[in-house]
Structure formats: structure tokens, C-alpha cells
Amino acid sequence: MNFDKPRPEFYKAPLDIFQFNGMPYMQLGKSGLWVPRVGLGTWKFGRPESGDEARVDQETGLRIFDRALELGVTFWDTAPRYNNASGNSERVIGAWFKANPDQRRNIVIATKLYGGMDGLTPNHCRLTRGNIKESVYASLERMQIDTIDLLYFHHYDAYTPVDESLSAVEDLVRADLVRYLGVSNFTAEQLHQHRELESAFGSRCRIIAVQNQFDVLRGEHPDYPGVRKLTQEMGAAFIAYSPLAEGFLTDRYLDLSAVSKGDRIYDQGMLTNLATPANHASLRALAELARKWELSLSQLVLAFTLSLPGMGPVIPGASSVAQLESNAKAGSVTFTSSQINEIKAILTPAP
Ligand SMILES: NC(=O)c1ccc[n+]([C@@H]2O[C@H](COP(=O)([O-])OP(=O)(O)OC[C@H]3O[C@@H](n4cnc5c(N)ncnc54)[C@H](OP(=O)(O)O)[C@@H]3O)[C@@H](O)[C@H]2O)c1
């Protein structure tokens, strides 16, 4: 071999397997799947002109996806039921893949199933063998892809035997239509039940991620206490949904007199619940720290969420490219232990 021969350009590419496009990646639980520290929630992406009540139309959604790829925000979270069970969040993703077929392998797609979508009988919902398979086939078609990287059970099913659901997932994993399993909106007891049975299926049906509501101000949803701790013990990743409290944990709510119609939490009637005097005092104190450290409030919140033990990637929603860009920056922020203590001192109880 002639070692003096100049090496092809690609040999010079940095072999950094822990980041993509500048975004640090992390292992999802103890699985072999790696994801960016900051992903993207697409709950509000859809086709508002169809009356599906989405807030981000396809044109804006496609622009956000283009920029997300450039920033390494390559973990996209969706569900068939988003926006009035329209499937439109998945369709916007499908439109992007149609325009960018060579990018499929760079994006980690997470979607879900549980509620009724593509039929009206009692067999067209829940975690039955039939519904799991049909729902996955429909999601793949809407997203114009061949496999789902992470499939969540969107909700616990009290009627279908757990081993029936898991065996359906096992078939899908064997056929490479699904790669990994997660669950969402599960209680600790329901997680225990799954854990007891999943070992019968080897790694194919091991829960690698649990997606429940969590934000640093309010902690875990009161209906699902103890799930974060259990998830950590299981070696799965806890993925916080609505990590910005649907927009409240951002600088825009520091001046409540400036809030108006057109803001998501205002339009959904949530502002009064969130903007209690105690929450608002915490918000102002966190914003003060963020300013001191040259961050926005939302960047501080996302980076602090990422620092919590057992926490998987964050998946904030974004309704503009500017919001996405701001959120992506949180992926590279790490705090010293004294900074973490300063943040914790503001939050009661500290998460
Ligand atoms: N598994 C489940 O049952 C479940 C339930 C809910 C959500 N999720 C997932 O979790 C994802 C994230 O949750 P989420 O969308 O409910 O709430 P979120 O991430 O807490 O907040 C997103 C909202 O915050 C605002 N925002 C985001 N970045 C901002 C920034 N940098 N500056 C100012 N405002 C900003 C935007 O509001 P505006 O639109 O008002 O600008 C955006 O729609 C969802 O998209 C979905 O994928 C899952």
C-alpha cells in the first residue's frame, strides 16, 4: 500500500460519534439508540386550514424541519392523534421526507398509538394486536417512511392483556417496521406490570423511554407520581413532555400585561392556572439567573431539565424557526453544581 498517497477527503472527516451538526447526542436509556439532547415536539404541526386546530401550518413546519436538521435537532416527536386525531402532524413529517428522502437515516422518528383513528368500532383503538399493527401501518404511510424508530403506547390499556400488546410489537420489531418501544402517560404501577412481562420478549419489547408530563416548575403530573424515579431504576430514559409548560417557562410571560390572544396558553385558557403569584415569582427569579448567565429563561429551563438524573432528551415544541434555534442552544449548555444549587433554591420542591 502506498502510504504517501493523499487520503480521500472523507478520511479526514472528524470521527465524533457523540454529536451531529454540532448538537451533542445522548444514549436513550440503556438502548443502542442515540438521540440529540434537544429534540422537537410536533404536537401543534398540522394543517390548520383543514380545521384540525393545529397552530403550525405545513409551510412553517417544513421550514422548521429544514433548520432542525441543520442544527442537529433530529429527534422528532409526533402522534397520529395530534390535532383532533387528524394524523396531520405525521403528514407534515411525511411531506418533509418526500422532499428529503436521503435524510431519513439522520432523523429519529418517535410516534405513538392508542386512541381511535382509522375506524369506528371498538377494535379500532387501544393496544390490541390488530390496532397496534394497523396504527403502525397507517403512521408509516402518513410519514412516508419504512420504519418507526421509537413507538410509544400513548396511554395504558386496561382491557387488553399486556402480553398481547407486547407480542404485536415483537412482530413489528422482527419485521423492522418498529425499532424500539416506549410508553407514555403510564403510572408507576402500570410500568411495573409491563416490566414483569417484557423480559419474556428479550430486548425487542424492552421499554427504553417513558414520556410523561414534567416541567421544572410543577414537577411530575400529580396523576403519575414516582415514574421518573422508577424509570431511572429501569434504565429507561424519562422524556418530559411539555417541558416549557406549553410556553409559560419562557421570557414572554414575565410581563403578564403583554400577553394576548394568539398565544397558545392564553388561547387554551391555561394562563390563569399557570400564572399564580408563586409561579410568577419563581419565573422572575429564574429569569434573573438566566440573564446573569447570558441565557434566555427557556434555555435555562431546558438545560436544567437535561441535567436532572435519568432525564432523556427534551422535546420542546416550537412554532417558529426562531423558537427552534433558541431551544437548540440549550443542548450545549451545562451547569456547574453551584449553578444547579442556585436554580434548585428557587424551585419548591426542587425536582
Ligand atoms: N405523550 C403525550 O401525551 C404528550 C402530550 C403533550 C405533548 N407531547 C409532546 O411533547 C412536545 C412538547 O410539548 P408541548 O408542545 O406541549 O409544550 P412545550 O414544549 O412545553 O411548549 C411549546 C410551546 O412553547 C412556546 N415556545 C417554545 N419555544 C419557545 C421559545 N424559545 N421562546 C418562546 N416561546 C417558545 C410555543 O408556544 P406558542 O405556540 O404560543 O408560540 C410552543 O408551542 C409536544 O409537541 C409533543 O410532541 C406529548
Image (cartoon, rainbow, N blue to C red):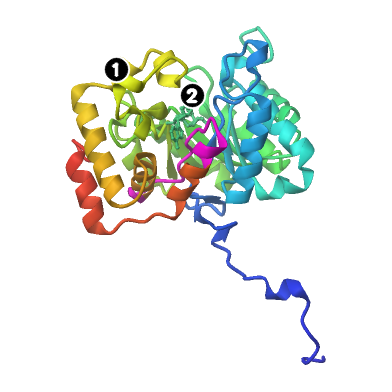
Local secondary structure at mark 2: loop
Residue under the image location 62 percent in, 44 percent down:
67
Say which of marks 2 and 1 sits in front. Answer: 1
CB at mark 2 closer than 8 A to ligand 1? yes
For residue 281, side relative to residue 116 (left or right): left
Q: Give residue 210's position: percent from left, percent from top.
A: 45, 37
For residue 312, side relative to residue 65 (left or right): left
Is residue 305 shown above or below 151? below
Of residue 143 and residue 281, the one placed in the foreground of this image is 281
Which quadrant does the C terminus fall into? top left
**Residue type indicated by callout 1:** Asn
Per the rendered image, the range of residues in magenta is 307-324
Is residue 17 shown above or below 234? below
Is residue 29 shown above or below 50? below
Q: Reading the chain from its start, which is encountered first: label 2 or label 1?
A: 2
Residue under the image location 67 percent in, 50 percent down:
106
Instruction: Tell me if mark 1 has few (under 14), some (14-19) or many (20+) residues whose alpha carbon lies within 10 angstroms of its own.
Output: few
Is residue 234 shown above or below 268? below
Q: What residue is pinned by disc 2?
A: 155
What kind of secondary structure does the magenta stretch mostly adopt? loop
Residue under the image location 67 percent in, 12 percent down:
50
| Disc number placed over residue 273 in the picture, else none | 1
Q: Give residue 53's position: percent from left, percent from top.
A: 57, 14
Q: Give residue 121's position: percent from left, percent from top.
A: 65, 7
